[in-house]
Amino acid sequence: MARAAIVPVPCTSKELCRGGGIARQAAGRGLVAPAVAADHRYPKDVIQGFPRVVDGDTLDFSGTRVRLFGIDAPETKQSCKAAKGAEYLCGERSKQELLAKIGKASKNRDKYGRVVGICSLAKAGSEREDLNAWMVQQGLAVAYRQYSKAYVPLEEQARAAGKGIWSGSFELPQQWRVDNPRGKKAPAPAPAAAAAVVAAAPQAAAAVPVAAGGCAIKGNITAKGEKIYHVPGGAFYQRTMIEEGKGERFFCTPAEAEAAGWRPSRS
């Protein structure tokens, strides 16, 4: 197993951070460049070791949990749809791929007590490979736009190439967590479920970009069959693809959507 290193860097969101010791140290020193902090100025802020993989975006270094910064992998119990419509456990796949990657070769703490950081693996010479970037590049996680735009270009490349979860359709991990809070039993995969929140590459599905007449509110149906509408500017609006053949549709006003049985997105 390769020895991994985590670079803690300062938090920028009250929701993400919990203000642990590492958070205060990093913020107090005004860290702005993780690589600089790790390699030159603040070596004691780097967590090194042989981690246990908890899921696709969480590692455990002898009891210290680390959340990979700027990415969001499917949850372990989350299922996605492959290109031909078959469901598979995409969260478990992300976990296993991350495990295999570490095996062959803090942005502070989040609200669950995990250090949030950028993980890197040693390469030839003094070079290191950004593990967070690799997960997004392989289509095993999405860029966590709420906290960072750093990995958005890699996500777009993975989506265009149809890699990993982008080979089919899936519900964004962030939305999946809203629909499946901790402690609640995850729903069983539904073979004939309605369209998920995110479609794969644009050419992979017959998505309707704009409704006739210019109505812009997107009425989506999740994998659980729940009807949710998204307004322009919402957290999931740009990623939500509408497939009218599966019962999804556009609305002109929120009132129209709610009258038809849709509820507003919680984000």
Image (cartoon, rainbow, N blue to C red):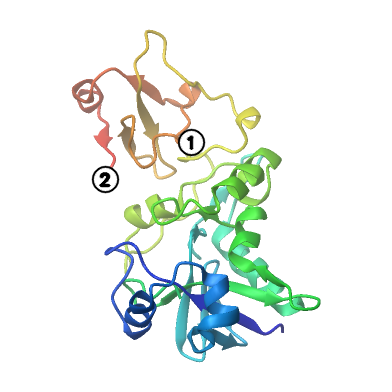
Give the x, y percent position of residue 120.
Answer: 63, 73
User: Badge 2, how many Cα within 10 Å: few under 14, some, many 20+?
Assistant: few
Give the x, y percent position of residue 171.
Answer: 47, 47
Residue nearest the viewer, comparing 16 with 107: 107
Give the x, y percent position of residue 253.
Answer: 24, 20
**Sequence-wise first label, 2 or 1:** 1
| Amino acid at the residue labelled 2 | Arg
Identify the residue position indicated by label 1 in the image. 195
Quadrant of the image containing the N terminus: bottom right
Q: Is residue 103 above or below residue 163?
A: below
User: Taking 244 as reference, is 261 left or right?
Assistant: left
What SS does tag 2 mark? loop
What residue do we see at 45% from left, 67% from top? Answer: 32
| Amino acid at the residue labelled 1 | Ala
Identify the residue position indicated by label 2 in the image. 266
Give the x, y percent position of residue 22.
Answer: 38, 83
Q: Picture quarter containing residue 64?
A: bottom left
Residue nearest the viewer, comparing 162 with 205: 162
Let me know if residue 52 appears in the view.
no
What residue do we see at 61% from left, 60% from top? Answer: 133
What residue do we see at 55% from left, 53% from top? Answer: 151
Foreground disc of the pair 2, 1: 2
Q: Picture quarter containing residue 263?
A: top left
User: Taking 84 as reference, is 228 left or right?
Assistant: left
Q: In this view, does 86 lie above or below 71?
A: above
User: Taking 163 as reference, is 80 left or right?
Assistant: left
Let me know if residue 166 appears in the view.
yes
Count of all numbered marks drawn on residues in the image: 2
Question: Looking at this rendering, what residue extends furthest in the top direction?
Answer: 213
Quadrant of the image containing the C terminus: top left
